[in-house]
Amino acid sequence: MAQRYFTLLDRCISEIDHCIHTLSAHNKVPKDDFPPAAALPDGQRKQVASMMRVNHAGEICAQALYRGQALTSRDPAIKSLLRHAASEEEIHLGWCQQRLQELDSHTSKLAPVWYGMSYMMGTAIGKTSNGFSMGFVAETERQVVIHLDQHLKNLPKSDAKSTAILQRMRQDENQHSTMALRSGGRRLPRPARSLMRATSRIMIKTAAIL
């Protein structure tokens, strides 16, 4: 059977479809073995919801970044790695979204903005060398792990489900970072790392309340 050739229009339609799916409030939640959700006092519920909204926004960004990089990367192996990472981030997205629903809260109202900005950044990075592109993935995931560690410290001890979700996410993000380094990722220059941290802080502070 002849392999189908996807035109630019085909790829654009696919990316638009994925964007709509990612931003949908009705994403399919993957099966999991997390502890059941426990009732939390109102103050703790709002605190956890704020953290999970930030993590959900982060997964929106990750989807867009990796899809954008995969679209413009010239290396088939790198494209495959990025799409695999994006598929795992999509699972995280479902977990965070479900937890927000359980907490009677909402996802970030600026989700389309996070997706659009991250996608444009991803397409630009995908055009760079494999070393820089994979280095960007490794640094992104390194910073995410640091962020998740902070959230794990701040979660109420009684919220076993949110803790389990973030621990699983942390494990996957660590693996993504390792994968990127093994694929030739190189350490980014200090100014690039600093800019990434600054941009991340803006998203975190904004998504926590919006």
Image (spheres, rainbow, N blue to C red):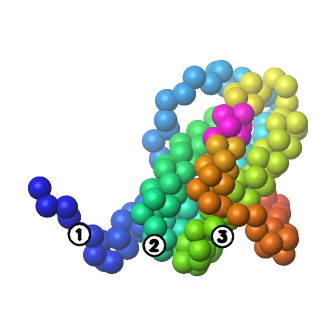
Q: Residue at x 58, y 56 (%)?
A: 183
Q: Which residue is located at x 69 percent, y 57 percent?
A: 138
Q: Nearer the viewer, mark 1 or mark 3?
A: 3
- Classified by dominant secondary structure, the portion drawn in magenta counts as helix
Q: Is residue 57 magenta?
A: no
The type of residue carrying mark 3 is: Phe
In-front residue for pair 100/54: 54
Residue drawn at x 66%, y 34% is 168
* Relative to 208, residue 154 above or below: above
Q: Name the one closer to the observer, 128 or 167.
A: 128
Count of number-bearing discs:
3
The quarter of the displayed image where residue 37 is located: top right
Do residues under tags 1 and 2 come within 8 Å of each other at their CB atoms?
no
Which numbered disc flags the more N-terminal residue, 1 or 2?
1
**Which region of the structure is painted magenta?**
166-172
- Residue flagged by tag 1: what amino acid is it? Tyr
- In the rendered structure, find residue 5 and report the number of the disc placed on it: 1
Q: Residues within 10 Å of mark 2 (few under 14, many from 20)?
A: some
> Residue at label 3?
132
Residue 1's quadrant in the figure?
A: bottom left
Left or right placement of residue 4 versus residue 171 in this view: left
Q: Position of residue 158 (x, y in %)?
A: 81, 23
> Going by the picture, which residue comes out furthest to the left?
1
**Taking the image as drawn, is residue 210 in sight?**
no
Q: Earlier in the sequence, mark 1 or mark 3?
A: 1
**Residue at x 46%, y 67% (from the top left corner):** 75
Say which mark, if any, is on residue 74: 2
Give the alpha-carbon distance from disc 1 to disc 2, as whole Å: 16 Å
Amino acid type of disc 2?
Answer: Arg
How packed is label 1: few (under 14 Cα within 10 Å), some, or many (20 or more)?
few
